[in-house]
Image (spheres, grey):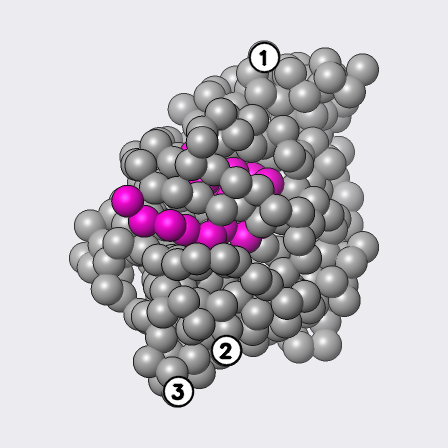
Amino acid sequence: MSRILVTGAAGFLGSFLCDRLLAEGHEVIGMDNRVSGQTENLDAAFEHDRFSFYEHDVTEFIHVSGELDAVLHLASLASPVFYRDYPIKTLKVGALGTHKTLGLAKEKDATYLFTSTSEVYGDPEVNPQPESYRGNVDPYGPRSCYDESKRYGESLVRAYRDEHDLDVRVARIFNTYGPRMRLDDGRVIPNFMRQALTGEELTIYGDGEQTRSFCYVSDMIDGLVALLESDVQEPVNIGNPDERTINELAEIVLEVTGGESGFTYEELPPQDPQVRWPDITKAREELGWGPDVGLRDGLEQSVEYFEMQLEADI
């Protein structure tokens, strides 16, 4: 059994990761300031006597008593709705939060996992994106608070690895979806689900031919755990290489929800990436990981959750 700290524990991915680690017999300490995380995501975790939770902002000094075997830094404002509303908080959690959690891992001689993002590739000129691609990012653009917070975080992780011989992992996470996503998340799948289930027209930005690659949450958690248990200290793409247009996604959402809505096309937000497609060769070869859940199956497994969230909001 290991003793593991998970920051961003009340978030979408963080809560599922806590559940997985608890199921594997570990002791888990969850930490979240609940700016975007929701405590109800941790209902299952609270049933374990090996789980404890602290409401804390990771940009402030972090104290954890006793030994730690791993520090998993998932705290972040990953949704466009939240990072546009809180750009400074987003930058601080990527910079100060990463610094504080790295310092804690160094103090405890713990393995450190940083969840980065496919957004480090910006609006890519290479498709699919391998880890060797350096990206096409505007450091002063409308998305820069999130992009640059993660790019800086990766650099800080590298510096701690090189200067302090810290055992590190870096996951570049591509679009992930599933239960526990907030309805007001602002990302495309919660938006489409809400609109389809309420009979609204689905809002598509641009011509809908821009692409994304969607990974179901259970596959993502498998990938993160595989990375943690590996000895790979370089960034690794974790995502599903099934590239789809937004128009295709909209059609599938209508099919799985039984919706009959039409589509409304609006202007594409500035610097919205035209393509997003992970090259997961490294994950397959070095982690033995690849996704198992197809897009339609994953959406079908998510519908009930979004229906319940809509009913709770009424």
Q: Which mark is residue 163?
A: 3
Q: Which residues are magenta?
A: 1-19
**N-term-proximal mark, 1 vs 3:** 3
Residue 3, horizontal then vertical, whole percent:
37, 50
Residue 283, horizontal then vertical, whole percent:
27, 56
| One can see residue 241 in this view | no
Determine if the magenta segment contains residue 46: no
Residue 45, horizontal then vertical, whole percent:
49, 31
Badge 2 element: helix
Whether label 1 touches label 2, CB < 8 Å = no
- Report the amino acid beneath label 1: Gly
| Marks 1, 3: nearer the viewer | 3
Which one is in front, 265 or 147?
A: 147
258 left or right, relative to 90: left
138 left or right, relative to 239: right
- Report the amino acid beneath label 2: Leu
Q: Which mark is residue 156?
A: 2
Residue at coordinates 66% horizontally, 53% vertically from top-left?
56
Q: Please determine whether, in this image, residue 126 is positioned above or below residue 283.
A: below
Residue at coordinates 56% horizontally, 32% vertically from top-left?
42
Residue pointed to by mark 1? 258
Q: Quadrant of residue 70?
A: bottom left
Count residues near mark 3 (Cα–Cα under 10 Å), then give few for <14, some for 14-19, many for 20+.
few
- Report the amino acid beneath label 3: Glu
| Marks 1, 2: nearer the viewer | 2
Q: Which mark is residue 36?
A: none
| One can see residue 256 in this view | yes
**N-term-proximal mark, 1 vs 2:** 2
Q: Quadrant of the N terminus?
A: top left
208 left or right, relative to 203: left
Badge 3 element: helix
Q: In this view, which residue lies farthest toward the front?
A: 66
